[in-house]
Amino acid sequence: MKTLEPLIAEHPFFKNLEKSYLELIVGCASNVRFDAGQFIFREGEEANQFYIVRQGKVVIESCPPGRKPISLQTFSDGEILGWSWLVPPYHWQFDAKAVELTRAITFDGKCLRNKCLEDHSFGYELLSRLVPALGTALEAARMQLLDVYGVQQQQ
Amino acid sequence: MSDQVVMERNELNGLFTALQSQGYTIIGPTILDGAIVYDELASDKDLPEGWTDEQDGGIYRLKKRFDKALFGFVVGPYTWKRFLDPPEKRLWRAERDGKDFHIVPENETPPKYAFLGVRSCEIHAMAIQDRVFLQGEYHNTTYKSRRESALIIGVQCVQAGGTCFCVSMNTGPKALSGFDLALTEVIEENRHYFVVESGTIRGETIIAGLAVRPAKKTEVAEAEKRISHAAENMGRSLNTEGVRDLLVKNHDHARWDEVANRCLSCANCTMVCPTCFCSTVEDVTDITGEHAERWQKQDSCFTLDFSYLHGGSVRSSTRSRYRQWLTHKLATWIDQFDESGCTGCGRCITWCPVAIDLTEEVEAIRKSSSMESDPPIEKGKS
Amino acid sequence: MDTSNPMIPQPRKIKRVIRETHDTFTLCVEPETVELEKSFKPGQFNMLYAFGAGEVPISISGDPRKPDVWHHTIRDMGVVTRALTNLKAGDTVGVRGPFGSAWPVQESRGNDIVIIAGGIGLAPLRPAIYALLEERDQFGEIVLLYGARTQEDLLFTKEFERWRGKYGVQVRVTIDSAGRDWKGNVGVVTTLFPGVRFDPANSVAMICGPEVMMRFAVLELKNLGIEDRNIYVTMERNMKCAIGFCGHCQFGPSFICKDGPVFPFSEISPFFGIREI
């Protein structure tokens, strides 16, 4: 466990986090490894964790009935994966699958949720780091929605 | 150039015959369809003798004068640009030969024009178009050859029109240069004459063949008095101070919406403007598909197609098209060519069917402008 | 080109047509001999005329070191480009040009280079990439971030390996929409920044793509600390003459044909993003 601390402390997401909070986070973290093709989570399952991708590539997919799965976004080294653990009813909205061998750090969302409730300063600290990441993801999703590379249709 | 001379009214036709004998086609003011337009003149009889024009926002009408002035009006719906760069011209033809084709350029022998009755604002308009078509790396070849060969005979304005504001734009009413000859028409109780000034050697040569005599001081003073009178009676005025920043920085002003409610996007203002230069091209083929042509045609930023790009128009609203026209004319033109694109001739006000008046629009924006900062760069966030 | 009458296209033989994607192809045209001396600068464009159909501005996408062939990569999206699609090797096309401003290749020596391309936007950037790689040691890191709609829309993919392997270019590719067989990145082009090595304080960025994409890219580059004057973008508007006479391509005070199409962002930033400008 101790070996994870410098790794987490150096990650931009946790940078300059108060020492006691960092210890708390490290206490909730563990290493995970996914083989290529392995699902990390599936739509509808309980969402009780989030991930920092250390090395590899993860794809978020949706599989509409009667169609092939659609890739929505990929996550690679250093990126934060998952936020459904923070929003009731804590269920994943999409599938996440390792495209290649992927090593990641997983964080116990249930534990962190409870800590946030107990200690609002900690909760604020964590959320103020997560919200920008969500914002970026939302912007990116909107951009994709624009289909900027497509041939415009007459307005 | 040289001292001014005087030519009596009844000697004016001598100027016509002199020009004609030198092979010039004389283009000047004449009455057509209830307006004074520029067209080919055979003699001084074609001039609008005894007529004047009454002008205001959206209003133009001819009225009889109480005298027999030949140039007793201001400017009409025509401009000289139609003779310097025709509103429609074939650029070239293409002929197919098998898998290949070859291009046959349109080689024009430029007409030898003498423009008679060019006003100061119009001389400035030509100088403005010179910068557009002749100043850069490439030249508009038709314009170049026609412009170089055209003889400019100016007429100094001795009265101002209801929509004139050349004084505000520093383009008149007195032409100081840019002409070969300049006439000032003076009508006294028992006398009708022209004070004539030459601006070039070409002009001197023409004067030399006319029945003229040196002007007396009193005659020159009479002419100057009348030009001053025109300067003091401008129908409109425009405060040009800081107008570049005023318009550029107020791109989001509510006045653009307001004017868009009135503007019909009819493009009249651009058609009558002596400096508007935009054009489009049209490619045509005949039924055999062996013969193709490219035509260049006058175009206007008020048309929807003007800004068409990949399936849509960039300026799809009238608001944006009026803004483009006015901002270009009075503001970004300065960035592009170091001077305003407006000469204050007032044609766009007169010929607007709903009497939109750019001097009024600028003033409205000026009165309610909030220009503290540069236009914001759109933030991607929302 | 013959400057005496810049509106006259020169008929040129098409040497070769390269099918790039389902809707994009490259016309390889032999320029006139006298034009060889002048060549073209990366970022410049030609006006291509399809007999009877009309003329369109097309950027030159080939190698400026090989000026004996001009490459024009064209996406079939309108009447004229459709007519150009139908041309084959041996046919004739009308050419006017080259026109316009260039990417600041020599001017950027000693810097890291960040190139961001979207869709067909990689075409006008390719000559710049060739020019950069020609004197690779003059530059620090070279980054290419490339986004397209789908895997099928990606251009010049065969060259990416050489650029990566031989020249150490950090080439990152992403697409907006992917199926299961795609193992690469999915997401917009700005999501490619994490993990890319370059020094924002000493970088020159060159962007070409749809205007909306460029807005996001510029914003991201500014967030990373690249100054406006070191960000270059290409603009596109309706264009009829390419020499500043027709008035169509005006963007605020700029004529895109003669002042652009490549602009330092600092020059156009007051107008960039204004609606219907």
Image (spheres, grey):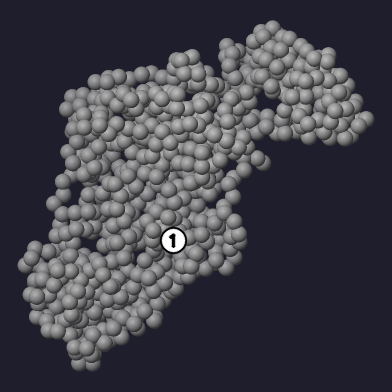
Q: Which quadrant does the C terminus of chain B fall into?
A: top right
**Residue C82 visible (yes or no):** no
Name the residue located 52 percent from the left edge and 29 percent from the top edge.
C112
Q: Chain of mark 1?
A: B
**Residue B254 against residue B7 in the figure, above or below:** above
Name the residue located 23 percent from the left edge and 54 percent from the top edge.
B143
Can you give x and y, in whole percent of width and height, for residue B125 in the image? 31, 63
Q: Is residue C86 left or right of residue A38?
A: left
Q: Is residue B283 left or right of residue B149?
A: right
Can you give x and y, in whole percent of width and height, for residue B177 in the image? 26, 70
Q: Residues within 10 Å of mark 1 (few under 14, many from 20)?
A: many
The quarter of the displayed image where residue A43 is located: top right
| Residue identified by numbered label 1 | B330
Can you give x and y, in whole percent of width and height, for residue B14 in the image? 10, 76
Q: Which quadrant does the N terminus of chain B fall into?
A: bottom left
Q: Is residue C69 left or right of residue B315?
A: left
**Residue C241 visible (yes or no):** yes
Name the residue located 33 percent from the left edge and 75 percent from the top edge.
B173
> Which is nearer the eye, A61 or A48?
A48
The quarter of the displayed image where residue C256 is located: top left
**SS at badge 1:** helix
Q: Is residue A46 left or right of residue B363?
A: right
Can you give x and y, in whole percent of width and height, for residue B32 in the image? 25, 68
Name the residue located 35 percent from the left edge and 61 percent from the top edge.
B273
> Which is nearer the eye, C156 or B80?
C156
Tell me the kind of residue under disc 1: Leu
Q: Residue furthest bottom?
A: B189
Total numbered labels: 1
